[in-house]
Amino acid sequence: MAKDLNKVQMTGHLGADPEMRYTASGSAVTSFRVASGRTWKDKDGTKHDETEWFRVVAWNTLGEICNQYLTKGMRVYIEGRLQTRKWVGDDGQDRYTSEVIAQDMIILSSRRDGPPQADDDDADDAVFPEDTPPARPAAAAAPRTSKPLASPRYPATPSARSGHNQPTPFNDEDIPF
């Protein structure tokens, strides 16, 4: 028997900062809206722009990550599934909403593209989440030794096989997006 498929992939910009709350059982749930636009020309050559808004819901760890790192205006890739919920409104009428339940999120904005976190006029001094190095555990705070981390049979990098001790440093600017 064939499986069904319910998969949504989109890119777009956040319309507002995410909102996080917790369920009674302690699960984190974060919701935000993403605007995804498209442009096309009709047969007369007239250019048209259209924006579609999507409600996105992220649960548990992904929800906490979205709440921590996403801000209004950031460009993101969201992958998930479409879900429609039904409830009864205050007027007694049935209400429906469709939302994307996120299973994966990738920040597409670079540090240069993202909105500043500070409310000053100098955007060059703004602090982005990527600028803050992650906290290291106490055990990892000790200075590194010159002992290689990879085994001689399976070196971690090609440079380790060729006898070079220092691998080429990774730079965020090397990422094409």
Image (cartoon, helix red, strand yellow):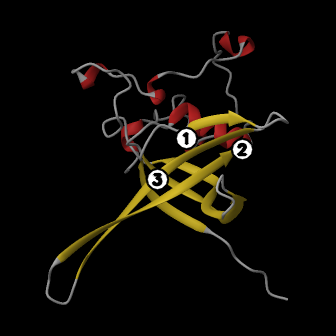
Q: What element carries label 2?
A: loop
Q: Residue at x 44, y 25 (%)?
A: 131
- Whether 67 is drawn above or below 1: the answer is above
User: Can residue 40 be seen in this snapshot?
Assistant: yes
Q: How far apart are marks 1 and 3 (CA)?
A: 47 Å
Q: Which residue is drawn at 53% across and 46% down?
A: 32
User: Taking 32 as reference, is 2 left or right?
Assistant: right
Q: Distance between the residues labelled 2 and 1?
A: 12 Å
Can you give x and y, in whole percent of width and height, for residue 20 in the image?
Answer: 62, 35
94, 152: nearer the viewer: 94
The kind of residue tagged 2 is Tyr
> Can you name the residue that lies furthest to the front here?
91
Can you give x and y, in whole percent of width and height, for residue 87 in the image?
Answer: 71, 59
User: Taking 81 as reference, is 164 left or right?
Assistant: left
User: Taking 95 as reference, is 173 left or right?
Assistant: left
User: Which is more foreground, mark 2 or mark 1?
Assistant: 2
Can you give x and y, in whole percent of width and height, for residue 146 in the image?
Answer: 63, 18
Give the residue at mark 3: 34
User: Which is more foreground, mark 1 or mark 3?
Assistant: 3
156, 138: nearer the viewer: 138
Q: Residue at x 34, y 28 (%)?
A: 116
User: Taking 153 as reference, is 40 left or right?
Assistant: left
Q: How far apart are marks 2 and 3 (CA)?
A: 44 Å
Can you give x and y, in whole percent of width and height, for residue 118 in the image?
Answer: 35, 21
Give the residue at mark 2: 154
Give the residue at mark 1: 162
Q: How crowded is mark 2: few (under 14 residues within 10 Å), some or many (20 or more)?
A: few
Q: Is the C-beta separation of discs 1 and 3 under 8 Å?
A: no
Q: Mark 2 or mark 3, which has the lower sequence index?
A: 3
Q: Mark 1 or mark 3, which has the lower sequence index?
A: 3
Q: How crowded is mark 1: few (under 14 residues within 10 Å), some or many (20 or more)?
A: few
- Whether 140 is drawn above or below 168: the answer is above
